[in-house]
Image: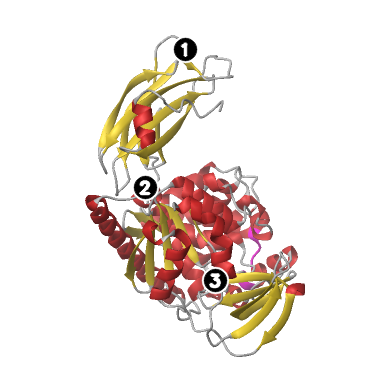
């Protein structure tokens, strides 16, 4: 069975199984009226739920009124790496998973179909590369935590990184794992779940490891410092994660340094954006339209705090570490706790930021020049990385030329790339049998084919869409025969 087919069983496997270990036994009634007993530790109660931390490290939420009985028999024995591999094999199918372990990390690749011998070798090499990266994250994070004197604790469970070869499988898993309560799955490159305790990413995001690094910092914080499901402000959660930056497997920036990208983006933000609103409310981080600016503000605020008053910063982290799972922290209380720790208001910090960041840029000799070139577009989708240069034909039409790289480390791919204009026209390129890491040219073309249902008109901008299938697959053969998917818009 494919990884997608197995997702119908996700809830049952994640939260319905039981294990006979020495643990408190909780009996509750589920939404279907069935009586279920599971072994777990009660980690928190609030907002109408109990949080049960199971032997496998996952947190199961049950309504307080559904709990029927609790037998105090002790905490569960934490799962080990072998047990975690068995659980993931059951969830995604033994034939669909490949593992590599560098304790405390367990990296699991969820593949999209059978691999040949060479593909298996490539998969093994890639998994070892991912495991090494996670160990690098661990070292860099622990150095920062020691420097800032965080109240750290020992790990209880293997730290899992899930890498999905298929974007469709990742998006299906993301919808189920988040319950649709986050930014739209199609807009997520990776995420850490406080419920499963797993980090999940698209394989295409591992080309630079930027996304795995960001999410791995969340995983580190919630396993070593903070309590999962505690009311941690999103600005802090995202602020510390955006403070780290990777260049491939090399982690080159940590929160005490100026991140050139966020510092540059900060200069473009409206001066009317209020830091107080970010501290008081998390709403901007879960809105597709606002999330980008919110993350930049989170970096600004976190950088300002960690670099200007390390003692106050440490007090605030200690306060956050004491917050209990499912606790309900109201807006005014969040603001009071912030101001009590730093003895400054968000408005005062915001007023001082411009001078502080200018000084930080000069001291660290940070290059803020934007390396992007006008008229050039770079994007990654469905295991393809495209670089395009916009061109015109002198008659009011727009097109592009450039190149595409297969960023799948596992198998050859067939790609269909389209540019689709705001004026309702498109053009496309079919690139067949592109080997891993191989690049192919996209010859100059003008978008002059009408998108179904659109009224063609002059346009000066376009969107890029990349679709891919495994080379040699039935879909790839249909594409070669001329049965192309056509434009994304208008479907």
Query: Which of these two is toward me, 147 or 127?
Result: 127
Magenta stretch bounds: 341-346
Q: CA distance from mark 3 to mark 2?
A: 43 Å
Q: CA distance from mark 3 to mark 1?
A: 56 Å
Give me the residue at 37% from left, 54% from top. Answer: 209
Are the residues tagged 3 and 1 within 8 Å (C-beta)?
Answer: no
Q: Could you tell me which quadrant the C terminus lies in? A: top right
Q: Which residue is mark 1?
A: 396
- Residue 103 visible in the picture: yes
Q: Is residue 210 magenta?
A: no
Question: At numbered mark 2, what does the secondary structure look like: helix, strand or loop?
Answer: loop
The disc, 3 or 2, on the residue closer to the chain's N-terminal end is: 3
Please state the horizontal and vertical placement of residue 385, each as a whole percent of the image.
Answer: 36, 39
Q: Nearer the viewer, mark 3 or mark 1?
A: 3
Q: Which mark is residue 377?
A: none
> Would residue 64 appear left or right of 465 to someone viewing this image?
right
Query: Which of these two is toward me, 277 or 424?
Result: 424
Are the residues tagged 3 and 2 within 8 Å (C-beta)?
Answer: no
Q: Is residue 342 magenta?
A: yes
């Amino acid at each position: 069975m494919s990884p997608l087919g197995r997702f119908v069983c996700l809830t049952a496997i994640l939260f319905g199984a039981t294990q006979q270990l020495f643990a408190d036994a909780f009996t509750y009634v589920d939404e279907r009226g069935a009586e279920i007993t599971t072994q777990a530790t009660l980690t928190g109660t609030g907002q109408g739920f109990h949080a049960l931390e199971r032997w496998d490290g996952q947190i199961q939420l049950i309504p307080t009124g559904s709990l029927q009985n609790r037998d105090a028999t002790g905490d569960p024995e934490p799962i080990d790496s072998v047990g975690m591999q068995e659980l993931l094999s059951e969830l995604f199918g033994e034939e669909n998973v490949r593992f590599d372990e560098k304790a405390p990390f367990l990296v699991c690749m969820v593949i999209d179909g059978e691999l040949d011998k060479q593909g298996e070798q490539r998969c093994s090499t890639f998994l070892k590369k991912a495991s090494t990266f996670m160990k690098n994250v661990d070292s860099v994070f622990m150095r920062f935590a020691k420097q800032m004197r965080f109240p750290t604790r020992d790990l209880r469970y293997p730290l899992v990184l899930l890498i999905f070869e298929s974007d469709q499988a990742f998006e299906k898993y993301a919808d189920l794992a988040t319950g649709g309560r986050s930014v739209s799955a199609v807009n997520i490159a990776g995420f850490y779940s406080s419920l499963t305790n797993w980090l999940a990413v698209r394989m295409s995001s591992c080309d630079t490891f930027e996304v795995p690094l960001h999410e791995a910092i969340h995983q580190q914080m919630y396993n070593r410092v903070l309590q999962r499901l505690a009311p941690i402000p999103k600005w802090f959660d995202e602020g510390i994660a955006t403070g780290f930056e990777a260049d491939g497997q090399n982690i080159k920036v940590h929160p005490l340094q100026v991140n050139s990208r966020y510092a540059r983006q900060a200069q473009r933000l409206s001066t009317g954006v209020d830091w107080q609103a970010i501290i008081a409310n998390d709403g901007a981080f879960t809105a597709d339209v606002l999330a980008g600016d919110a993350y930049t503000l989170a970096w600004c605020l976190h950088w300002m705090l960690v670099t200007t008053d390390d003692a106050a910063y440490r007090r605030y982290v200690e306060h956050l570490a004491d917050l209990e799972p499912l606790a309900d922290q109201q807006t005014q209380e969040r603001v009071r706790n912030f101001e009590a720790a730093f003895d400054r208001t968000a408005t005062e910090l915001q007023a001082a930021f411009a001078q502080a960041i200018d000084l930080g840029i000069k001291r660290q000799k940070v290059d803020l020049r934007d390396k992007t070139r006008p008229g050039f577009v770079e994007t990654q989708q469905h295991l393809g990385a495209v670089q395009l240069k916009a061109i015109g034909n002198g008659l009011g039409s727009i097109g592009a030329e450039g190149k595409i790289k297969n960023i799948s480390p596992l198998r050859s791919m067939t790609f269909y790339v389209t540019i689709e204009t705001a004026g309702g026209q498109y053009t496309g390129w079919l690139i067949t049998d592109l080997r891993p890491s191989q690049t192919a040219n996209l010859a100059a073309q003008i978008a002059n084919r009408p998108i179904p249902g659109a009224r063609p008109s002059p346009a000066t901008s376009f969107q890029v869409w990349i679709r891919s299938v495994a080379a040699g697959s039935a879909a790839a053969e249909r594409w070669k025969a001329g049965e192309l998917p056509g434009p994304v818009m208008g479907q």
